[in-house]
Image (spheres, rainbow, N blue to C red):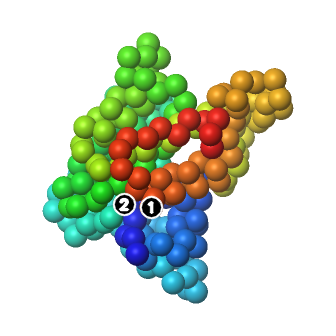
Amino acid sequence: MTTLMLVGATGAVGARTLTLALADPRVERVVALTRRPLADPDPETRVSVDNRVVDFSDLVPGADFWTVDAVVCALGTTRRIAGSAEEFRRIDHDLPVRVGELTRAAGATSYALVSSVGADPDSRNFYLRVKGETERDLRAVGFPSFTAVRPSGLYGGTRSRPDNLGDRIAGASRLLSPVLPNRVRPVHVDRVARAALEAALDATPGTHVRESETL
């Protein structure tokens, strides 16, 4: 039985990952790191949910909750929402890598990251470069099993701002899906969540990439 850490549980992919984890017989306990409290889980679930509300700018080494078997990180924002390039990098690079360092030091053996199609540390595109640097730096942490899940545009899930620009673009892309290359077709959040959870729990040794067209 696995103790899973989930980071980003209040987002669309993270929320769906939590739902799937609570129904997975391989999961015994979920440690959910969030900035605000989660809703109380279904009292009928057999999986223990340990919701730790933390200050992500001050993650404390040595805390007991870092001791987990596997990690799914679904943290992510955009430069516009973050407000600056520096804040975007802190959320999409520094925090996932720091979580990786702290959980690996406490014995975690697998890490699944929700990244992005086109992630490349040498990209001229700032967003894709940061995503690629995050993958690169997490690989260097030394998890026996590391998986980067690289979806294209996302759709589905619960949104706090249902009419934002990103959702409208994803919706338009869905209409064009039949003529778009598989690699850039939008992907439902359920498929991304399922791929990330399976990678973390299966913990196949080595470094793996799940490209968008395989989700």
Q: Which residue is mark 2?
A: 70
Count of numbered badges drawn on the protein? 2
Q: Which residue is denoted by mark 1 in the rendering?
A: 201
In this rendering, the answer to whether 100 lies above or below 176 is below
Name the foreground residue: 192 vs 96.
192
Q: Is residue 97 left or right of residue 179?
A: left
Q: Quadrant of residue 70?
A: bottom left
Q: Position of residue 165 (x, y in %)?
A: 67, 32
Element type where label 2 sits in the image = strand
| Image point (59%, 59%), residue name | 16
Is there a contact, CB below 8 Å, between mark 2 and mark 1? yes
Q: At x 67% / y 41%, what residue is drawn?
A: 187
Residue 177, located in which quarter of the rendered image? top right
Q: Residues within 10 Å of mark 1 (few under 14, many from 20)?
A: many
Which of the marked residues, 2 or 1, is nearer the chain's N terminus? 2
**Depth order, front residue of 95/183:** 183
Q: Nearer the viewer, residue 104 or 124?
A: 104
Disc assigned to residue 49: none
* Res 69 visible: yes
Percent x, y for residue 213? 64, 35
Q: Nearer the viewer, mark 2 or mark 1?
A: 1
Residue drawn at (55%, 82%), measured in percent from left and top? 45
